[in-house]
Image: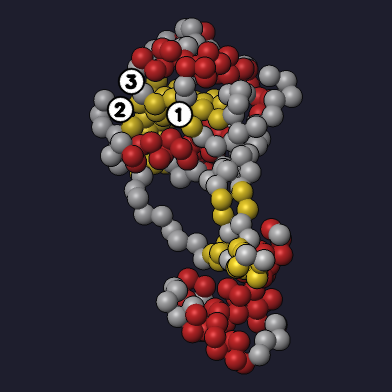
Amino acid sequence: MTGARLRVTSVRVADATDLGLVAGIEDAGDVRFRGLVDMRGFGATPTGAERIAARGVVLVVGQPVVGFAHVVARAGGGAELAQISVHPDAGRRGVGAMLLRAALGVALDQGHGALHLDTFAEVPFNAPWYAAHGFRVSGTRAVAEVADRRVEMVREVADTPTPIPAVSVIPVRDGPDGIEAFVQHRVATMDFAPGALVFPGGRVDARDRATGAGSALASGLIGEQVSGWAESAYEMVGGDPEEAARTLLATGLREVAEET
């Protein structure tokens, strides 16, 4: 696994070829717990086939796999994150966060209102990492087989995404056979919509407001922009309609320049 590259970073459901790598990834990831917790009472590491047999969903990242998450139904209701592991060679690249977001999505898709987990109470980097991703402590418990306490955490899930102001641009030109439009393929290593055919564009940056305000634009063009954006949510961008139109125009120009 040394020198592993994430040729595909989008999360997917594990298939039969992925399952043989799951236990090895967990064992490699557990090395960082040595000296921090007593691992003797946990028994053999479950294989990928055993995790599938538990009727949960195993999510993976990478080809070959470098990280996985296992989501199961919880006896008391809701979904439980039974395990999330990333191979150290792929650490600090956001793989764990990608898997955690996908696990929350699985819980939501299955109709659960929350995702539960438990982790080591005394390990300095586990519970704080989950807390940074919206989990809160719901209790603690002792584990009979080992000396280390566990902290129980939960995060509610709901289909209430927060819209983000963004702009897409369709650059066109006259071609020998008619109008041509510029499109591009998102590379396969992207987390969101890998390989998709898209127009250039992206979210509004803070600098776009200043750029738009300082742009020397003809009054007629500003009026066209205000009219063109009249059906959009100006309040998401902030300011009056002219300021919002200038900001969105600056975003579109910047994104086209960056992506073409």
Q: Which mark is residue 74?
A: 2
Label 2 near label 3: C-beta < 8 Å? no
Q: To which quarter of the image does residue 209 belong?
A: bottom right
Q: Residue 210 in the image: state x and y as whole percent.
A: 67, 76
Residue annotated with mark 1: 13
The kind of residue tagged 3 is: Arg
Residue positioned 56% across, 16% down in the render: 21
> In the displayed image of the protein, which residue is found farthest to the left?
76
Nearest to the eye among marks 3 and 2: give it. 3
Label 1 near label 3: C-beta < 8 Å? no
Q: Is residue 183 left or right of residue 103?
A: right
Residue positioned 37% across, 29% down in the render: 80
**Between discs 3 and 2, the one toward the N terminus:** 3
Q: Quadrant of the N terminus?
A: top right
Residues at marks 3 and 1, CA–CA distance in whole angstroms: 13 Å
Residues at marks 3 and 2, CA–CA distance in whole angstroms: 11 Å
Residue positioned 60% across, 68% down in the render: 179
